[in-house]
Image: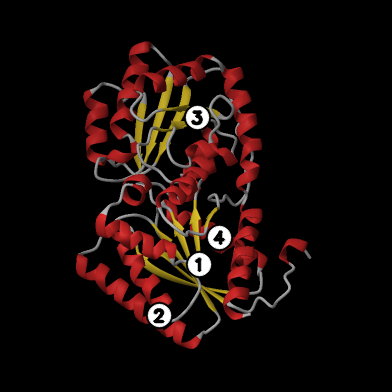
């Protein structure tokens, strides 16, 4: 038996996980699914109850309200029946935070230990720049949670500077396994992949402008755009208007298996985002040894080391994106070295060790609360 799973007390407690619908797309759902799969394979000796508070499916406000109300009733019932319970809340920003605060308050009323897990793409503007009532509410929720999980070291340092008496632990998003490493072709167009929601914060305008500039430079490339969102129609129209439809393919949203296939067939992942947490698509890219060109925000520098397994630039720096992608198109030996390095770097994000760290945190909370 793995020694890291040996603990001095029985693991017969229950974890209630409050988060998104696992059947849908989205970064938080992807993270929770990886943890849930690892839990099933390791069977660490405690039960997990999944409670969804939101999904990415279309629906009116009444349907969304009914989903939350139904989940609250299930949640209260579980807390009544199961005393030895830890509540693990996965939270984004905005409405997600206020909705999760309801579940936090209920857990507090029942005296249960709380893990508050932050995934907010707009972490800095919502949590760090908060003032007035919002800042007071954040201080109360985070300060009185038993454990706050931040995705990267910068988030932890900013939280410790901004708020009082927090117990913050950095826990990177995990990947299930390393895949078969991609094969870098020595000739042909540079195959670039973008996979994310087609919304302004993902740098969609910069994505299209970069593709335009690459064509004007005479760079041979193929850009595949995977995603859905409010700018989906604009992307299709703009690709045609700019005359880059021979270089750019817009696929819309695709199943997870097809994403993996596209990652394996690509040469580089490109993510020019303005707001992120720790993008799962970058971790998946590293699991294939796929080099990454991305921005210097939030948890991305914890995953992409500039010049080692990819390149980083400031958000909006289109000229830098063009220069780096042009360089990769011209230098396949460099592309190969970045791939080798990225594949090795992916080792630190494997779910096994990260999940066992989380289990150790659960054990400490259980011992402190229930003896």
Ranked by sequence position, the earlier of labels 2 and 4 is: 4
Instruction: Give the alpha-carbon distance from disc 2 to disc 3, as whole Å.
Output: 49 Å
SS of the residue at dot 2?
Answer: helix
Picture layout, residue 297 above or below residue 356: above
Residue at label 2? 109
Q: Residue at 45% x, 87% y: name it.
A: 80
Q: Nearer the viewer, mark 2 or mark 3?
A: 2
Mark 1 vs mark 4, CA separation in Å: 20 Å
Is residue 186 visible from the viewing direction of this image? Answer: no
The quarter of the displayed image where residue 222 is located: top left
Q: Position of residue 225 (x, y in %)?
A: 37, 35
Label 2, label 4: how far apart the Cα atoms are: 27 Å
Question: Residue 224: x, y in percent?
Answer: 40, 33
Q: Which residue position is annotated with label 3?
A: 268
Disc 1 crowd, CA 10 A, few/some/many (<14, 14-19, 20+): some
Determine the CA span between mark 1 and mark 3.
40 Å
The first of marks 1 and 4 along the sequence is: 4
Provide the secondary structure element on which disc 3 rests.
strand
Q: Nearer the viewer, mark 3 or mark 4?
A: 4
Which of discs 1 and 4 lies nearer the camera? The answer is 1
Considering only order in the chain, which callout, 4 or 3, is on the residue closer to the N terminus?
Answer: 4
| Residue drawn at 55 percent across, 15 percent down | 331
Report which residue position mark 1 lands on.
146
Q: Nearer the viewer, residue 6 or 237?
A: 6
Q: Earlier in the sequence, mark 1 or mark 3?
A: 1
Way the structure is coloured: secondary structure
Front one among 122 and 284: 122
- Looking at the picture, does residue 345 appear above or below residue 186? below
Q: Which mark is residue 35?
A: 4
Q: Residue at x 48, y 88 (%)?
A: 81
């Amino acid at each position: 038996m793995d020694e890291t799973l040996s603990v001095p007390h029985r693991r017969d407690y229950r974890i209630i996980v409050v988060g998104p619908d696992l059947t849908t797309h989205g970064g938080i759902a992807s993270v929770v699914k990886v943890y849930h799969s690892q839990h099933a394979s390791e069977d660490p000796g405690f039960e997990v109850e999944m409670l969804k508070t939101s999904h990415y499916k279309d629906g009116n406000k009444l349907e969304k309200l009914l989903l939350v109300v139904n989940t609250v009733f299930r949640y209260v019932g579980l807390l009544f029946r199961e005393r030895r319970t830890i509540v693990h809340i996965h939270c984004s920003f905005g409405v997600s935070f206020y909705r999760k605060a309801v579940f936090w308050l209920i857990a507090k009323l029942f005296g249960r230990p709380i893990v508050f897990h932050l995934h907010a793409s707009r972490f800095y503007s919502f949590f760090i720049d908060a003032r007035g009532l919002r800042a007071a509410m954040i201080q109360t929720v985070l300060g009185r949670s038993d454990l706050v999980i931040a995705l990267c070291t910068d988030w932890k340092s900013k939280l410790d500077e901004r708020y009082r008496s927090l117990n913050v632990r950095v826990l990177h998003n995990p990947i299930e396994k390393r895949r078969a490493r991609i094969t870098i072709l020595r000739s042909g167009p540079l195959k670039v992949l973008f996979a994310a929601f087609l919304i302004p914060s993902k740098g969609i305008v910069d994505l299209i402008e970069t593709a335009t500039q690459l064509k004007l430079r005479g760079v041979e490339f193929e850009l595949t755009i995977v995603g859905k969102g409010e700018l989906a129609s604009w992307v299709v129209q703009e690709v045609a208007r700019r005359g880059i439809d021979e270089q750019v393919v817009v696929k819309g949203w695709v199943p997870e298996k097809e994403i993996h296939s596209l990652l394996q067939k690509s040469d580089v992942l490109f993510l020019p985002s303005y707001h992120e947490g720790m993008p799962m698509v970058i971790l998946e890219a590293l699991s294939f040894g796929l080099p990454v060109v991305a921005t210097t925000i939030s948890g991305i520098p914890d995953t992409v080391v500039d010049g080692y397994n990819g390149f980083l630039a400031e958000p909006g720096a289109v000229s830098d994106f063009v220069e780096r992608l042009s360089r990769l198109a011209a230098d396949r030996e460099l592309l190969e070295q970045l791939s080798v390095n990225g594949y090795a770097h992916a080792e630190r994000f494997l779910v096994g060790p990260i999940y066992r760290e989380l289990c150790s945190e659960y054990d400490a909370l259980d011992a402190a609360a229930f003896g």
